[in-house]
Amino acid sequence: MRDRAPGCWPGCCARTRHVVVPAPARREGVGVRRLLVGVVAAVVLLAGAGPALAGPGEDVLRPGEHLEPGQALLAPGGVHSLVVQPDGALGLYAGDGTAPRWSSGRGVAGSALTTGATGDVRLVAPDGTLVWSTATGGSGGTLRVRDDGEVVVTDPAGAVVWSAGTAQAPSTLDGPARLTADAVLSSPDGRYTLLVVPGAGVQLQGPDGSVRWAPGTEAAPARPDAPAPTTAVALELRADGNLVAVDEDGDRVWRSRTAGLGARSLAVGDDGTLVLRDDAGDAVWSSGAPVGPSTLDPGGELAPGASLGSPSGHLGLVVRDGALVATWDGEDVWTSGDVGGALVRLQPDGNLVLVDRDGTPVWGTATAGHDGARLVLEEAAVLLVGPQGGVLWQVAVPADRVPAGVRPADCARVDGPVPEADTVRTRSGIRVHACLAEAVDALVEAARADGVVLGGGGWRSPDQQVALRRAHCGPSDHDVYDKPASQCSPSTARPGASRHERGLAIDFTSGGRTLGAGSAAYAWLVEHAEAYGLENLPGEPWHWSVDGS
């Protein structure tokens, strides 16, 4: 079993036979998907006898049917389409269709897609040469494109015998609906997950596995174990617009108090905020961002009630009781002292000041003369950084407060899941094992120098992996721990088998979007990632690990 990534859904697996290649060439400036819209709506029957063609707009390719170049399967909801491209490769498109989300690999122009009588799905070149196959002969399988973006081969009983690993977890729950332990919501970039953890209740987990929100918590907890476990076994978005957490008896243990306000959907945002929206798309309730922004730009202000936070959420900066206060896991580690301050302002000249209610500075860093300075919260320090990158002022977290586990320098020595204490968050915000951090920082900086901005998700907690198995494989312990990954939908690694749990894999994003085979970021990684010790999992352009698994 091999892992995959956040823009689709953590845990799924692609087992194609070829490495993904960039998006197919366009003709006369027309995108491939636009070129095929008419074909998808009405499959053109070519002259001459031959195997049956898939019906117009269908989502399945049955044994004995085939698709010609330029034809496609269309998911029932119409969002995802699997296209036999002019270059002879398969491409899965979604949204605006400017680049494929998945590709079968290098094709041969004129190839056709067929499902054999035994269930093997194959791309065959005009001369009869096999170009690509799902290797599912004997299954009696049918190729399907699902509404979640997954491409699968299912046997006559409906069991999945092959998957492309392209499923996208929903980020929105449309009411009335119920979120239980067999389902999850994920932010579009895959970094935040709303789920029900058996024995722990409803949780919004961040990219490092920490709990960022739970029913009944007014503000974001700063450390992974901060929220008290709840008795909630489900989160319900009711017809009256109320979001309600209920226990095993169906009794309410928390509510959003939004009945009658027209809430129709619950969404998980890329900033980790839960939002209830009405039919017009207006927010009627929000959980609040679990971690404040990590920077304050020139001219920016921080008022009481607002906060800055490091990417992990451990380090925070707030205005409280007339003082500027730095906290670590909710405990004060530094204060300016009560000087009657009402808000913090970063002046354009680079001076960070506390001002009173009249706007008069009552405390400052005495760093004027550095126009363009920015305030930055890294993992263990508050830094005022000058325009040339120099540190003008800082507050360091005491060394005894920062976790420091036993961290082997050689990633080859990491042979199983690791705790969060053995991981670090890189300067780009990606949490990985300490043995990989330096290389990831160097890779991200090199990419940025070439105009490619990379982000992504790395380490995944064992609880997250178990939750994914429960959602994708079934609710029982057998489903979670014993069922083969190939029988899950989407395919999901058994707990303990994921490189993400070791902190040795990254699901890269660029601009908040999962990498596609046609993206500039993917092309850059193909050319350069090996020099930094990362290999790509064939068929998943977003997923890179120390050994390509």
Image: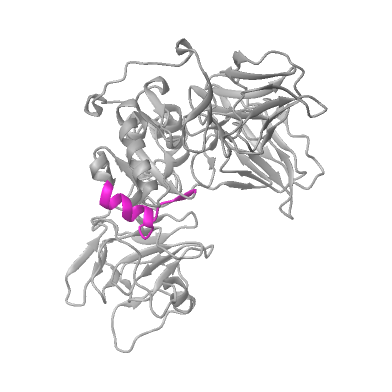
Q: Quadrant of the C terminus?
A: top left
Q: Quadrant of residue 329?
A: top right
Q: Which percent across, then down, holds residue 462?
A: 41, 27
Q: Quadrant of residue 363?
A: top right
Q: Is residue 375 above or below residue 520?
A: above
Q: Nearer the viewer, residue 62 or 516?
A: 516
Extreme-front residue of the structure: 369
Q: How is the image coloured?
A: one colour
Please give left or right for residue 414 compared with residue 292 in the image: left
Q: Which percent across, then down, holds residue 467?
A: 47, 33
Q: Is residue 273 above or below residue 117?
A: above
Q: Is residue 359 visible?
A: yes
Where are the magenta residues, as a range?
Answer: 512-528
Q: Quadrant of the N terminus?
A: top left
Please give left or right for residue 278 compared with residue 156 in the image: right
Q: Which percent across, then down, holds residue 435?
A: 30, 27
Count of numbered marks = 0
Extreme-top residue of the structure: 400
Identify which residue is drawn at 52% across, 34% down: 386
Identify which residue is drawn at 83% across, 28% down: 358
Identify which residue is drawn at 34% across, 77% down: 52
Q: Is residue 394 above or below residue 238?
A: above
Extreme-bottom residue of the structure: 47
Q: Which percent across, then down, holds residue 145?
A: 43, 60
Q: Is residue 448 magenta?
A: no
Q: Is residue 56 visible?
A: no
Please give left or right for residue 467 compared with residue 67 in the image: right
Q: Is residue 37 above or below residue 302?
A: below
Q: Nearer the viewer, residue 434 or 131?
A: 434
